[in-house]
Amino acid sequence: MSLIDLLTGSTSNQVAEQAENKFGISRNQIIALLAVAAPLVISYLRNKSQDANEAEALNNALDKDHDGSILDDASQAEARQAEGGSILDHVFGGQKSTVENQLSQNTGISIDKIGPILAMLAPVIMGYIGKEKQQNNVGAGGLGDLLGGILGNASSQAQTQQSSPLNDILGSVLGNGQSHSGGNPLNDILGSVLGGGGGQQQQQGGGLGSILGNLLGGK
């Protein structure tokens, strides 16, 4: 399953509906946030997996807690929100508040809600990674390549299917983030995309904001 399949599938819609009911944020905004958060989390984990100890810890966590069952039972997302917060603490470390601030500014989701919503999405992202790991029969040593492959496939798919706002978001997010394996994913992804510079300035401030405007206006 590609990242785009995850974003457009029933699991994402059901989780977005839960978050909409709980936080009063529109379903499209939740899915758009997932379209940015998923590759961001995967990029951070790919960088961490360059370290053998981190790769082993991630491998164990995926085997133990993230078998992909959440993709078939979206009600787990709300029940596992506290666990999701711990996942984000580990993934982003000291940059967690910076990530949340950037995402809040560029999605229009208030800072007091962005963290709890991300905590609902985190187990879904991990479940997706866990399912891909199982299907590809990958161990700790192959996680970096698996995660890089997920990002590469999503980038290729987004570039060849440009009709969807979600494809546009993924294409933008992955445009610069994937070649700098030794760099900082926050700078690669948030800096290049969510900073909103460049030629889209004439729209709603550019960057993700204009894509979100299209997405929210188009459904």
Image (spheres, rainbow, N blue to C red):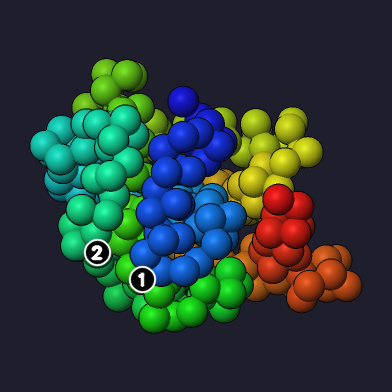
The quadrant holding residue 182 is: bottom left
Q: Reply above or below: 182 against 113.
A: above
Residue 174 shown left or right of residue 86 in the figure: right
The quadrant holding residue 83 is: bottom left
Along the line of sight, the residue nearer the viewer: 215 or 58 = 215
Kindly identify which residue carries mark 1.
Answer: 115
Identity of the residue drawn at 73% across and 63% down: 213
Along the line of sight, the residue nearer the viewer: 130 or 68 = 68
Label 1 SS: helix
Is residue 93 visible in the rendered image? The answer is yes
Residue 117 shown left or right of residue 53 in the figure: right
Is residue 198 visible in the rendered image? The answer is no
Please give the label number shown on residue 102: none
**Do callouts 2 and 1 mark residues in contact (Cβ within 8 Å)?**
yes
The quadrant holding residue 163 is: top right
Label 2 SS: helix
Q: Amino acid at mark 1?
A: Gly
Inter-mark Cα distance, 2 to 1? 8 Å
Lower position in the chain sequence, tag 2 or tag 1: 2
Kindly identify which residue carries mark 2.
Answer: 85
Along the line of sight, the residue nearer the viewer: 194 or 30 = 30
Residue 196 shown left or right of residue 14 in the figure: right
